[in-house]
Image (cartoon, grey):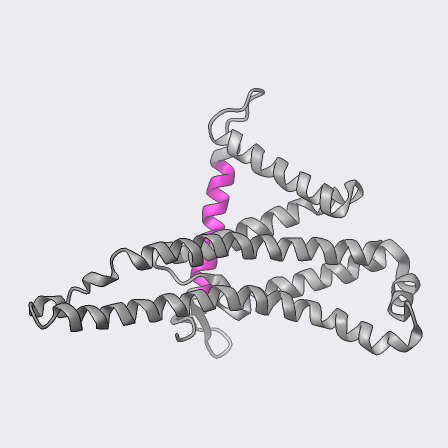
Amino acid sequence: MNGPKILFEIPLMGGIAVTETVINSWLVMIILTLLAYLGTRRMERVPRGAQVVVEGYVGGVYSLVEQTMGKDKLGFAPYIGTLFAFSLFSSLLSLFGLRPPTADLNTTVGWALITFALVQVSGVRSKGLKGYLKGFLEPLPMLLPLNIISELANPVSLSFRHFGNIAGGMVITMLLYGFLGWLSSVVFGSFLPIFNDIPILQVGLPAVLSIYFDLFTSILQAFIFCMLTMVFVAMAMD
């Protein structure tokens, strides 16, 4: 599997490469914006249609944030809800034959760095700079180097976990398609040469595996990323 293709370049500062990741990320943002607009353009006291889905999602996010972080941290719910939706829809693009932005390490590293900055800022605002720095000396001052390494390792683990699972699923799916195409030509190609160009064995099994790699894994990784974000922020503030 190669990296994202460069689709075109913007002739600024020596050429800014615009890859599949950038285009597909904008596609996801447009989709989410349209869904938000369609779900809220006709708000009614008694919700129905798309409003039910939107209110159910928003209520679920606020409930999850309250249970995980505490009622005093509900202000983080919009960020968590946006992060989950962006991650989920980005990964689900693979169901439509598009390269998911989450299969690009640049995407997940960017999200992890935003979360890392959020953790540090939230910790300082909650405890004050002195109290926040003092936390690195607990429970023993000699653990200062380990505490620093542990803090710096959080964005690394966040980004590589999400990227590795989505990219790994893509690799396995591509290898499976290639193998089934080769097997189809070996089994059926000797009887009818047309099957060398029509890989009949690629029908069925890859679709079933796609439910796991593209659907289940997408939901799971988006949920894990958001849960870890909430845990890290809550720990920094408490």
Is residue 32 within the magenta segment? yes
> Residue 220 colored magenta?
no
Residue found 56% across the figure and 63% down from its top? 162
Quarter holding residue 200: bottom left
- Going by the picture, which residue comes out furthest to the front? 187
The residue located at (93%, 74%) in the rendering is 141
Q: Residue at x 75, y 56 (%)?
A: 233
Give 199 or 163, whichever is nearer the viewer. Answer: 199
Residue 136 found in image quarter: bottom right
Range of the magenta residues?
21-37
- Residue 224 position, x and y percent, is 61, 56
Q: What secondary structure is the magenta-colored segment mainly?
A: helix
Q: State the residue in front, 60 or 8.
A: 60
* 195 horizontally vs 115: left or right: left
User: Does 166 sit left or right of 129 as displayed?
Assistant: left
Residue 143 image point, x, y percent: 87, 75
Above or below, 79 against 100 in this view is above
**Front-most of residues 40 and 151:** 151
Residue 102, horizontal then vertical, whole percent:
50, 62
Asked whether 81 or 164 is in front, the reply is: 164
Q: Residue furthest left?
A: 192
Left or right position of 44 against 198: right
Question: Where 60 falls versus 232 (above or below)?
Answer: above
Quarter of the rendering containing residue 18: bottom left
* Residue drawn at point x = 66 percent, y = 66 percent: 113
Q: Quadrant of the N terminus?
A: bottom left
Q: Is residue 26 visible?
A: no
Res 18 visible: yes
